[in-house]
Image (tube, coloured by chain):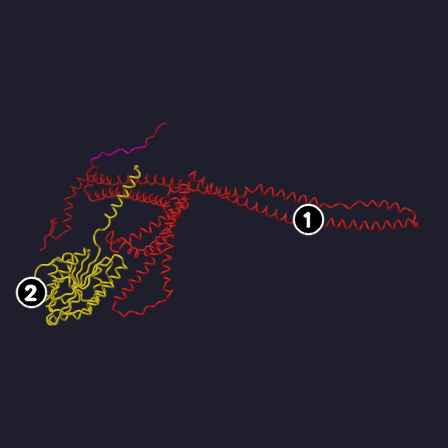
Amino acid sequence: MNKRSFLASASALGLSAWLPACADQRSHAHAVYLLVDTSGTYAQEVDKAQQVVNYLLGSLQPGDSLAVARVRSRSFSEKDIIAKATFDNRPSQANAQKRAFRDQVEDFTRSASGSAYTDITGGLIQGALFLNETGAGKRTILIFSDMQEELDKQTLRAFPIDLKNIRVVAVNVVKLKTDNVDPRRYMGRLEDWQKRVVAAGASEWRVINDLEHLDRMLKS
Amino acid sequence: MAESPFWMIVPGNAALSVLVLFAVAMPFLYAARKPVHELVHALAHLIGVPLKLVSLWLKAAARDMRERNRQVLLAQGREEAEQHLARDFERVAVLVRRDLEGYPALQRRLLDEITRVEEDYKKCGELPPPPPEWVEAVDAIAKVKSGNELVQRVLEEINRSIQMIYERTLAEYRGAYESRHKILNGFMPFWRSLDKTLAQADQKMTSLADHAARIDSQMVRYEQMVRLTDRAEHALTLSQLTQFFIATLVLAIAAGGALINFKLIALPMSEMVGAGDYLTSSLRTSDVAALVIIFVEATMGLFLMETLRITHLFPRIHSLGDTMRRRMMWVAFGLLAALAGIEAALALMRDMLIADKAALVQSLSMAPQPMAHVDGWFSAIPTAGQMLLGFILPFALAFVAIPLESFIGSARTVGGAGLVLGARGLAFMLRLLGNLVRNLGRVLITLYDIVIVLPLMVERLLKSKAAPQEPEKLPVRRVA
């Protein structure tokens, strides 16, 4: 091997070693976990959840992840995940996956049944586990609920949870009859959740009642 | 009650306080006059001199740069003129080889035609009718006395013979004329051929003369460049500036084309390399891949133009042998055609992806879906247009090599001229600043003296009293 060919090979090797190194190793994917409350009177809002899912399917890009799970009496279970997908990097495949996802969620909204209790915390823990598994750079939990948690006596949720680097957004937090009597209950409920979520290390806490504002939030 | 500032000696009266302070400070200011003057002078000098030096250095650098630019420009111009001259000489050589090579044949043809014409001319020379020898016989007979019957019969016989001979001679004479007319008539094609041949020769000579005139004008320009005249420099600078602006404009248009090209293939490239990979926080790998394809196309176009000897950016390619150069040209063309085909396919894929996405979004929206409107071949026009554009744009981009070469060539001159202008401007500004600083020092010294004008007046008064009266100076007259 003469000097010139060695130099050429060395520079080619250097270039091939440098190119992957210069690539951005951080994940730019966005993972969204949507918790849909099906308890009590909130079960009638499930149709709106379908709108949110459709919107998410329209705005998420190839490579992003989406999961929809229901909130029941005890929600810390994979069985409560109605549909989940990490969309393929190829746009055509991602579109096919999105169609299948939409059909799954549609089936769920048609057959959704109410539950006696509402375990939002369990759903949050399950959501955090899912999001951390995806390794996505941007992680969001959307809680489609009135944020009124009701647990049975055996279910234990009074412990600190870990929501580090996760953005938590409460969507369509409807007012209960009791909230109308005393609005402080509504405000207090949201404040409690904020304290809890921030204490869990969440990067952001937001409440979005107008679904049109969801667009701005997802793009930010 | 508000507390007065520390300097207010007379509380509540700022003006009086200032006046008192001024009066107190005046002796000190007077005492410090010389050091303060020296300090201001030194400061002005400290700032002004380096500024002046830098300004001088910049001026010298600008002069050097201008000279170097001039040399480069004229060298470039000489090289260009030499190339033009060489090309013109080549053309003339081709012309001479093509046209003058045929001149011996042309001359032979002309000579043949002229010989033939001469021969024919000789042939058609007029033959005088035979001398009427029988006239003497007629005269002799005519002298015989009339009334002789024998004579009369002889005369009648002679008359008959003469009539017969006359008719025959006349017929022969007319025949001869007819044949001469025929020969003359046969001249016409030869004359025409001669005329045409001469016209061709004239045309070729005129073309040669035109080329010679062009070579003459090129030579005049070349001589001016060799003599390093200002006129040649000015003409070359103007030409380079024009080239620079035209090349920039064309490159901007090409950049627009490249952008459209990018838009065409960026989305479908995500289907090939994935849409979720990023090189930086905002730069997708698929976008970079699309850009790389466009750059590769431009590079292939560059090589194609280079191997076709249209551009001269790579001397290495130019020095290749003809066979190797031709091979390289076909390789570059093949790659360019393949990339154009890929682009056309990507454009089709883009259309399909957009249609798929639109269908998905439509199905996701809860609004009632409108009836699909199918127009048959009419709806295929945009797709076909995109594919065609995807195929044509790489070839169109190949021609970017020509303005790029002009741009690179003229940028040296324009950049050099800009640098010289910048250096001169900066030198002027620094010189101005240096002068301002020096004059500011003088102004400060004068202002200082104005402030301490009272002690100065006293000093002058004392000096004038202490100094003895000087005798009036008278002009000294020198004795030669």
Kindly identify which residue carries mark 2.
A154
Q: Is residue A187 visible?
A: no
Quarter of the view holding residue B226: top left
The structure residue drawn at horizontal position 19% and vertical position 43%, both measured from the top left corner, is B454
Quarter of the view holding residue A164? bottom left
Which residue of the protein is positioned furthest toward the top in this rendering?
Answer: B480
Relative depth, front residue between B469 and B104: B104
Image quadrant for the N terminus of chain B? bottom left
Chain A visual colour: yellow
In the picture, the disc for residue B184 is 1
Task: Bin the neighbour count of mark 2 within 10 Å (Cα to Cα): few under 14, some 14-19, many 20 and up.
Answer: few
Q: Which chain is red?
A: B
Which corner quadrant of the image does residue B477 belong to? Answer: top left
Q: Position of residue B7 (x, y in %)?
A: 12, 48
> Mark 2 is on which residue type?
Gln
Q: Which residues are magenta?
A: B466-475
Tell me the chief SS of the magenta region: loop
**Which label sits in the foreground, 1 or 2?**
2
Residue ranking furthest to the left: A153
Decide which of A95, B36 is in the foreground and name it: A95
Tell me which chain the residue with mark 1 is part of.
B
- Closer to the camera in the image, B437 or B191: B191
Q: Is residue B190 left or right of residue A104?
A: right
State whether residue B74 is above or below residue B10: above
Local secondary structure at mark 2: loop
The furthest residue to the right = B147
Q: Is residue B306 magenta?
A: no
Image coordinates of residue B342 in percent, x first then y, are 34, 54
Residue plotted at (28% across, 62% down): B357
